[in-house]
Image: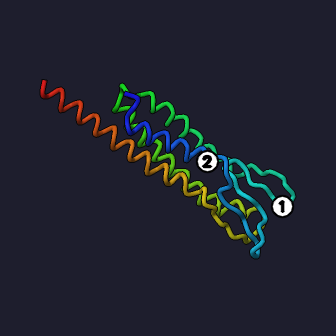
Amino acid sequence: MIQRKQTLYLLAAIIMTVICLCMQIGSFNVGGIEVARVYNLWFTDPIGKHHFDTWPLMAVLLPTTAIATYTIFLYRNRKLQALFCLFNALLVVGWYVCYFVVSQTVGDKTWGAVDFRPTWPAVFPAIAFILYLMARSAINADERLVRSMDRIR
């Protein structure tokens, strides 16, 4: 059924990733002065020009929202639903790998030695990761319950 607790977990994970996609996830600083604001798709330099060097972040995180939305409606196929939850969790781990690589390479390529400072919306994919694992656990519990009911019949 669609009114299960894993649906709530998946909806909360979708909300977390959409918030992260829309907000600033970091900044590049030189000598304590902010020289660029980093978003998932671009970073903005001090004169307001957008540079799309951070697009891999968007390319990894955006499919998780689509897959999670699709996963909600797979309530009849719990095995595939659990697999998609695990895949989304792995995509979030991939996002953090890309986030680390972008924080180390993009600023150095543009301004030389810069400091990268993450902002609080960068934590939302970690929360979504936990929610995906909780949803997968709830889906597996439902699957075990259905199998136990089939054995009783």
76 up-or-down from 105: above or below: above
Q: Which residue is mark 2?
A: 19
Q: Which residue is mark 1?
A: 46
Q: In which quadrant of the rendered image does the C terminus lie? A: top left
Q: Residue furthest top?
A: 153
SS type, badge 2: helix
Q: Nearer the viewer, residue 42 or 17?
A: 17
Q: Is residue 139 left or right of residue 67?
A: left
Q: Mark 1 or 2 closer to N-term?
A: 2
Please name the residue shown 56% across and 38% down the image. 63
Q: Nearer the viewer, mark 1 or mark 2?
A: 2
Query: What x and y, as percent, mark residue 15?
Result: 55, 43
Query: What x and y, as percent, mark residue 62?
Result: 59, 41
Q: In which quadrant of the rendered image does the N terminus lie? A: top left
The kind of residue tagged 2 is: Ile
Please name the residue shown 67% across and 61% down the image. 105
121 up-or-down from 88: above or below: below
Query: What x and y, as percent, mark residue 24?
Result: 68, 55
